[in-house]
Image (cartoon, rainbow, N blue to C red):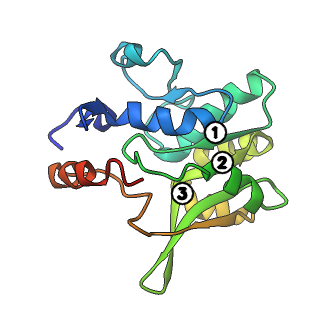
């Protein structure tokens, strides 16, 4: 994509992140952004920006941990995560994740295509009670979100791919163009 924050790329004249926030806001009571680097680049969104709580680069699970740490400090039992480059996720994502949650409280989003279940592990429900286990796993080199989640018995909330995959994420300029055609359909 040529560098920079994908979430600040424009679709339908608005940053991807604005689309994501608009879709998520009715589903949750609070939104924070997990981002490393200068938080001021997100000032226009009026949301707290929380960096990873572990030093180094640990991937998406480090963002989950940062959210869990913030939630624990606020007395919240669980968090939901979504990706800033995926603006068309389902309007009932959070409800369906809670309905699907394992006894541990953990659930991930998925779609079925070509006879296969495709997990979208950046879209999940994460119980804060697992945060110390996650911190330990990251310290031991765990980087694969799905492997850590499966170890805790994560369940799956399956979503339809009609009229298109709601977890379509934007990684290329061509994807940005395709996203323009999806606006209004989702």
How many marks can you see? 3
Q: Which mark is residue 107?
A: none
Side of 88 where 53 appears, left or right:
right
Disc with the residue nearer the chain's start (3 vs 1): 1
Residue 163 vs residue 99, the one in the foreground: 163
* Separation (CA) of disc 3 from disc 1: 18 Å
Side of 12 where 139 appears, left or right:
right
Q: Is residue 25 above or below residue 130?
A: above
Disc with the residue nearer the chain's start (2 vs 1): 1
* Quadrant assignment, res 104: bottom right
Residue located 37% across and 58% down the image:
168
* Separation (CA) of disc 2 from disc 1: 6 Å
Q: Please identify the quadrant where the N terminus is shown.
A: top left
**Label 2, on which residue?**
94
Is label 2 in contact with label 1 (beta carbons under 8 Å)? yes
Residue 26 vs residue 152, the one in the foreground: 26
**Label 1, on which residue?**
27
Is label 3 in contact with label 2 (beta carbons under 8 Å)? no
Mark 3 falls on what kind of element?
A: strand
**Residue 135 percent coordinates (x, y):** 66, 41
**Label 3, on which residue?**
121
- Residue 137 showing in the rendered view: no
Mark 2 falls on what kind of element?
A: helix
Disc with the residue nearer the chain's start (3 vs 2): 2
* Separation (CA) of disc 3 from disc 2: 14 Å
Is label 3 in contact with label 1 (beta carbons under 8 Å)? no
- Please rate how many residues cluster around mark 3, counting C-alpha atoms within 10 Å: few if below 14, some from 14 to 19, many from 20: many
Side of 176 where 139 appears, left or right:
right
Residue 88 vs residue 154, the one in the foreground: 88
């Amino acid at each position: 994509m040529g560098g920079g924050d994908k979430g600040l790329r424009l679709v339908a004249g608005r940053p991807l992140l604005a689309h994501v926030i608009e879709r998520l806001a009715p589903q949750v009571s609070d939104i924070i952004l997990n981002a490393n680097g200068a938080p001021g680049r997100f000032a226009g969104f009026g949301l707290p920006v929380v960096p990873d709580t572990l030093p180094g680069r640990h991937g998406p699970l480090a963002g989950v941990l940062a959210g869990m740490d913030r939630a624990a400090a606020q007395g919240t039992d669980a968090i939901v995560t979504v990706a800033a480059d995926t603006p068309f996720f389902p309007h009932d994502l959070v409800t369906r994740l809670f309905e699907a949650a394992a006894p541990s409280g953990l659930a991930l989003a998925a779609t079925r295509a070509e006879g296969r279940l495709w997990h979208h592990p950046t879209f999940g429900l994460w119980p804060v009670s697992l945060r110390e286990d996650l911190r330990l796993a990251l310290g031991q080199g765990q980087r694969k979100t799905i492997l850590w989640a499966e170890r805790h018995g994560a369940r799956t909330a399956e979503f339809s791919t009609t009229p298109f995959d709601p977890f379509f994420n934007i990684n290329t300029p061509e994807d940005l163009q395709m996203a323009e055609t999806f606006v209004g359909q989702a």
